[in-house]
Image (tube, helix red, strand yellow):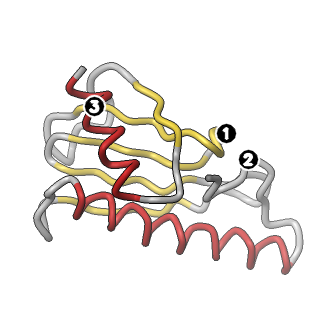
Amino acid sequence: MKLIEHYMNGYSDAAQREKLAAHRAAIFYLKKVATALGMAEGSYEVRSNKGGIAGPGEVTLHGERIYIQIGSSMSDRALVRRCKGRKDYCGERNHYVDVVDNPLAFAARVAVELNG
């Protein structure tokens, strides 16, 4: 599943609309992932960085112990890592997990990847 395609940009009105729609879909998806991972409301944030005109940007789920980012140049994979709080932007080692249609299945993959 590709939520935010690597080729997305803002060079035209149509492209900008496509990019914004993709970001909305990724935000919705990551909120479902947070719920599936048992993250309580208020213990995480979902941020959308639309990037500049030339790029797709990214959407990030950032909790107290987990950081998941969809977008940028990885259209079919998500960057996943452990972190120590919502001010930790570096976190631990990066993992890459395939994004699948079902956010519950994706959350299960994330849990397996991070718990080794």
Q: Secondary structure at mark 3?
A: helix
Quarter of the figure with the C terminus: top left
Q: Which residue appears at 38% of the width and 50% of the height? A: 105
Which residue type carries mark 3? Val
Q: Are marks 1 and 3 in contact (CB under 8 Å)?
A: no
Spot occupied by residue 107 in the image (x, y as percentages of width and height):
32, 48
Q: Residues within 10 Å of mark 2 (few under 14, many from 20)?
A: some
Q: Quadrant of residue 76?
A: top right
Label placed on residue 6: 2
Q: Secondary structure at mark 1?
A: loop
Q: Which residue appears at 64% of the width and 76% of the height? A: 21
Q: Which residue is mark 1?
A: 73
Spot occupied by residue 37 in the image (x, y as percentages of width and height):
21, 53
Query: Mark 1 and mark 2: span between their CA atoms?
Result: 5 Å
Is 6 left, or right, of 115 in this rendering?
right
The mark nearer the N terminus, 3 or 2, is 2
Which residue type carries mark 1? Ser
Q: Are marks 1 and 2 in contact (CB under 8 Å)?
A: yes
Which residue type carries mark 2? His
Label placed on residue 112: 3
Toward the viewer: 95 or 91?
A: 95
